[in-house]
Image: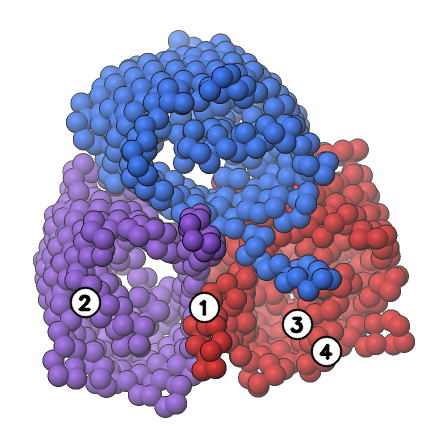
Chain colours: A blue, B red, C purple
């Protein structure tokens, strides 16, 4: 595109635009004690009739196309439309506009992750437990929405955020020291349903403390969510217009694994939730969180990450049928093994106790254990 | 692929195949005076319940893979299937076969733009007003169809068509001095519904007149369009088989902006249109056009394009519900600002008066004004 | 990614990841004698209301990303969801893990072709007849499923499999000398419906016999297929749970075209099939096969492949409406012409006699002839 004066070679498209991606193949049916134990948001192949499953098939096209313009487009080819699987659908598509020459101040436009929760920000490519914990992930289907967001971080901290991913420390990537903005509020790939935007803000800082790095964060959002007709069972009662308060505040503590690591998060808030007593969707209180303990073990070029995560959630999932009501108590014990850069393998044993109730299934608490396996390609 | 004898390096895949793209993020709700004013074909986020919106997310894979074979594949990742957004769906996918060594005579096979109208041919990446004018754009949903088309242009004129885009003059790209062929007629991404193909022809020529370039054109198409069951409201009357005459003729005048530019087009024809008097879809006369005046202003590496467009359309939109009936009178005043090569920003103020009526909404004339904003990434 | 010590340039993303693809544009309506003659699985544009049609639009992203890790992702952009055409949907997405340094033993995880039948394994990019024969292709919609497969072939034979494609001999590609594994059984892009996996095994060997290469093969699979609610006409009777035995065994003989070639396959088995006598879907016997005779003719850089194929099938198609019942007797005579590397053209005359019956169309035998045309781009 750019021919420079001094005999330099003009840059080619493949110097400015890069492609990478990853894929996760899973099997969840070994040592399963209760086939009625399911989790839609986690992995639709858990429990009865689940087989081999591709959970994510991501192709990422991205690049710093000029000094101040960066873009990131990520379709997922493991998405479904009705019963048709493996359709290409966007996860991310955004522009980053640098407001200063060092891109310390950035404006992000398009569909992207909403800065609410460390585990939500962290890529599934890097997470150890197979799925995000319900407590904070129930805030946003697919973690994303159409948004206009402002991020700020000093160059030095931007580099640190970057290294915490590239050097294998399971970081979140760079969502700024300060991030705030507006988003539609119906979550990823769903059309806006009202005339108000949600508002979100987050502060996070990765402190170096001796040989360790810790990253505490605070974040909150507020808005009005509309429960849409296609999410409702026939017969369930709903507020006129389907509109509900939707707001949360969360605290995060992260200790990066040098070699022992901790992720801990908790959120409280209010949102739509099915109430079996009244057969209606009501604005109700929600709360929950998780703690993940892990350890980073190098052996030559191989990495091992043993981990354990406990999680709790009590509240609704606004984007599920009838804003389904949940009480979740899960314990996961697992190991991520990276025998080489391009391939990872995770095995985890999950001890689960989940109540998930909507208009049709009003008494539904399921307890069970299962072994979960995942092979991951990184390209 | 090709190893040459004289020690040259064999060409790599990325030398023959290139990737580029663009994205448009919009917000249309500022200074809005009438939330009932909407336009499905233009931008579904205009009016009530519209929020932040990605209008286009295009990834283009293309290349001159051998002397006579060129291809172009353009999925759009801002397409919808029902209420599921941001699905990858094709806009263009075609082969160009050169019939002579200089590729002055070309056969184009696949889904591509149908040569009817300058503004239809011009990429949305280059257009100043945010949406195409209804008068000619109502001929073809997404401007495209499955087609076998023949194009001819002398090498010199092919180069001129190309420069009128690459040098920022907002050209249409190369659709030949002469173009003609056949197409299915149900418009882009919809299956053929009858046993007849549509026929289209176009003549355009970019004359250099002193320092100015003007490009007059004439074009026409004819065929039989089938209004399908999924477009019909329960109760609306329709011809047996749903088949209607569908034909138009259009005239174009373009003055490229050196520095002052004009785009003017008008078409007349016949096609299916809902008639509220008889509750039925009938073959009716249609007509309309637009004039865009604009100015090209350079300031260092930055470009500014102030523009004004007035449009009028009276007729049906064959591919909408009940072949919805329209009368449109719009005036748009705006500015496109290109602060750098990879980013553009458009603000336009739209003064709109639109009647759009189908079986369910039989009296629906909406007048209103709004400010429209767009950020565009080019990569 | 990999910086080597001795001053070598680090490898770039485009050295490890490649993109290629192909597209097929068709027209099937010339010299057609019976517009009621159709074939859903072959080509939906055969017969009444068929027009210009893009049968396949494939973009393949692939690469040997490290010594033992290979990946292959192939979306097709000519897929449909309901009446919405040209949606991007996966055909292949898999990881190959080399179990030894020479990758002679490989584990393949993800969605990929199930090793059952030479013509099923052979890419449509290389096949001469426009569609696969019904007898073996009725085993698997889109030839694929989610699977964990093991392949073994000695290095020398892997190279031979590869050359049989790259040198134009219309090979199948490398699906091992021995291949076996498990798969979900509902075929490509459809969710698993029961708690059992299908099992498949195949043995094939390309023997060099003088100047000729022959490749005999044996293959079989067994499992339980579930006919799903969305495949059923209202009124048709079905087993409780919709589950049916689904198993086949097949024999293959291939003589590669030096210059005369033969493909011959036959399979027998059992599977769900609509029975018009009882208005129900029953487990019934199925059988059928085909013989393709062809000739490879070089003229300078051009290739010509005249071919003739006769096929027979009697049985159900498990993944079609009501597990539709078929009796097929087709004869095709055609020519594939490759005037250059990036473009191919096929014309074939098809003499067809097809009975295809479901609950709604209980007496439906159609006979007819037609001329079929295809232009193919390879990039």
Which chain letter goes with mark 1? C
Circle 3 — which element?
loop
* C13, B307: nearer the viewer: C13
Q: CA distance from mark 3 to mark 4?
A: 11 Å
- Would you name the residue on which mark 1 appears? C379
Looking at the image, is mark 1 or mark 4 nearer the viewer? Answer: 1
Q: Give me the C-alpha separation between circle 2 and circle 3.
A: 49 Å
Residue at screen point 35% across, 66% down? C43
Q: Position of residue B330 (x, y in %)?
A: 80, 49
**Relative to B174, is A236 on the left or the right?**
left
Which residue reaches farthest front?
A: C6
- Please name the residue that numbered disc 4 is placed on: B157
Disc 1 is placed on an element classified as loop
Residue at 84% x, 53% y: name it.
B300
In the image, taking residue A116 as reference, residue B298 lies left or right, namely: right
The first of marks 2 and 1 along the sequence is: 2
* Residue in the picture at 69% in, 76% down: B158
**Looking at the picture, do discs 1 and 4 lie on one chain?**
no
**Distance of mark 3 from mark 1, alpha carbons?**
23 Å
Instruction: Residue C372: name its quadrant.
Output: bottom left
Q: Nearer the viewer, mark 2 or mark 1?
A: 2
* C42 relative to C228, above or below: below
Q: Nearer the viewer, residue C103 or A38?
A: C103
Q: Which residue is mark 2?
A: C157
Other-residue count near label 4 (Cα within 10 Å), few / some / many at <14 / 14–19 / ≥20: some
Which residue bears the numbered disc 3?
Answer: B175
């Amino acid at each position: 595109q750019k021919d420079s004066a001094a005999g330099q070679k003009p840059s080619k498209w493949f110097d400015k635009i890069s492609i990478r991606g990853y894929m996760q193949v899973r099997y969840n049916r070994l040592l399963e004690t209760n086939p009625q134990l399911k989790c839609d948001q986690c992995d639709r192949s858990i429990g009865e009739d689940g087989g081999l499953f591709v959970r994510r098939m991501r192709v990422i096209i991205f690049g710093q196309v000029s000094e101040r313009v960066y873009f990131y487009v990520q379709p997922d080819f493991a998405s479904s439309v009705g019963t048709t699987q493996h359709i290409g659908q966007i996860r991310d598509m955004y522009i980053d506009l640098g407001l200063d020459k060092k891109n310390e101040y950035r404006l992000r436009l398009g569909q992207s992750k909403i800065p609410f929760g460390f585990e939500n920000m962290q890529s599934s490519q890097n997470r150890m437990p197979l799925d995000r914990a319900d407590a904070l992930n129930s805030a946003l289907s697919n973690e994303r929405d159409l948004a206009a967001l402002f991020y700020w971080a000093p160059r030095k901290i931007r580099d640190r955020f970057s290294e915490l991913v590239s050097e294998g420390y399971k970081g979140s990537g760079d969502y700024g020291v300060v991030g705030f903005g507006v988003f539609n509020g119906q979550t990823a790939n769903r059309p806006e349903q009202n005339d108000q935007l949600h508002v979100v803000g987050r502060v996070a800082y990765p402190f170096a403390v001796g040989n360790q790095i810790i990253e505490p964060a605070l974040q909150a959002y507020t808005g009005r969510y509309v429960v849409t007709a296609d999410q409702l069972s026939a017969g369930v009662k709903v507020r006129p217009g389907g509109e509900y308060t939707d707001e949360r505040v969360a605290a995060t503590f992260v200790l990066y694994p040098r070699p022992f690591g901790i992720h801990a998060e908790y959120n409280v808030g209010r949102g739509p939730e099915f109430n079996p007593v009244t057969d209606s969707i009501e604005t109700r209180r929600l709360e929950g969180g998780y703690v993940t303990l892990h350890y980073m073990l190098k052996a030559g070029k191989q990495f091992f990450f043993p981990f354990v995560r406990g999680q709790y959630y009590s509240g609704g999932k606004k984007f599920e049928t009838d804003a389904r009501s949940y009480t979740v108590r899960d314990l996961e014990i697992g190991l991520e093994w990276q025998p080489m850069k391009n391939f990872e393998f995770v095995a985890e044993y999950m001890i689960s106790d989940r109540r998930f109730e909507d208009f049709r299934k009003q008494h539904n608490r399921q307890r069970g254990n299962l072994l979960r396996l995942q092979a991951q390609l990184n390209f």
